[in-house]
Image (spheres, rainbow, N blue to C red):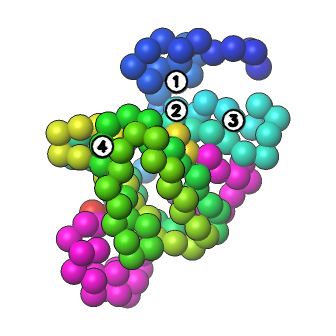
Amino acid sequence: MKPIFRYLGDFRWDGVPVEAYKSEGAHFREVTRQLLFGRDAGLATELRYFEIGARGYTTLERHQHTHAVMIVRGAGSALVGSEIFELRPFDLVRVPPMTWHQLRSAAEDALGFLCLVDADRDRPLRPTDGELEALRRQPEVAAFIRI
Ligand code: MN
């Protein structure tokens, strides 16, 4: 692994490919992923940079592993559990184990964030019909989520 990956500006790094957020599904919109520090960095964690284009959103999901997120670009909002938070640069967001979460960009702005996760982690789970029904019992959550 190279010791340095130069910053190119505009949230791009030399030698770090801009990848699709996930390889399948239509349960997200306008999201790219860059793996900044992967397994080859020799840590028990991975650091990724995600960017959600205007009006985009990540998958509504939950899992055993935790997310530690730092917003670094733009504006947006997040569902964490049953609460919705407005987000702006340098806010820190922690998603605890088995907590529903979804991030959305603002209508006119991208949302970029760093996300730290365990290198070895469980696969995300999407809500079942019953779980979705339960989430939608809260009107604020029902209005927020995109699937
Ligand atoms: Mn997640």
Give how far apart the Cα atoms at labels 4 and 1 are: 23 Å
Circle 1/circle 2 CB separation < 8 Å: yes
Circle 4/circle 3 CB separation < 8 Å: no
Disc 2 marks which residue?
34
Residue type at mark 2? Gln
Task: Indicate the quadrant where residue 101 lies.
Answer: bottom left
Who comes first in sequence, dot 4 or dot 1?
A: 1
Q: Is residue 131 magenta?
A: yes
Q: In screen coordinates, is 93 left or right of 37? A: left
Residue type at mark 3? Gly
The numbered disc on residue 17 is 1
Residue type at mark 1? Pro
SS assignment at label 4: loop
Residue at 67% of width from left, 42% of height from top?
46
In this view, the residue in front, 88 or 131, is: 88
SS assignment at label 2: strand
Who comes first in sequence, dot 1 or dot 2?
A: 1
77 over 63 or under it: above or below: above
**Foreground mark, 4 or 3?**
4
Residue at 34% of width from left, 66% of height from top?
84
SS assignment at label 3: loop
8 over 52 or under it: above or below: above
Give how far apart the Cα atoms at labels 2 and 4 are: 19 Å
Q: Give the magenta range.
A: 116-145
Give how far apart the Cα atoms at labels 4 and 3 are: 26 Å
Disc 3 marks which residue?
38
Disc 4 marks which residue?
75
Q: In screen coordinates, is 94 left or right of 103? A: right
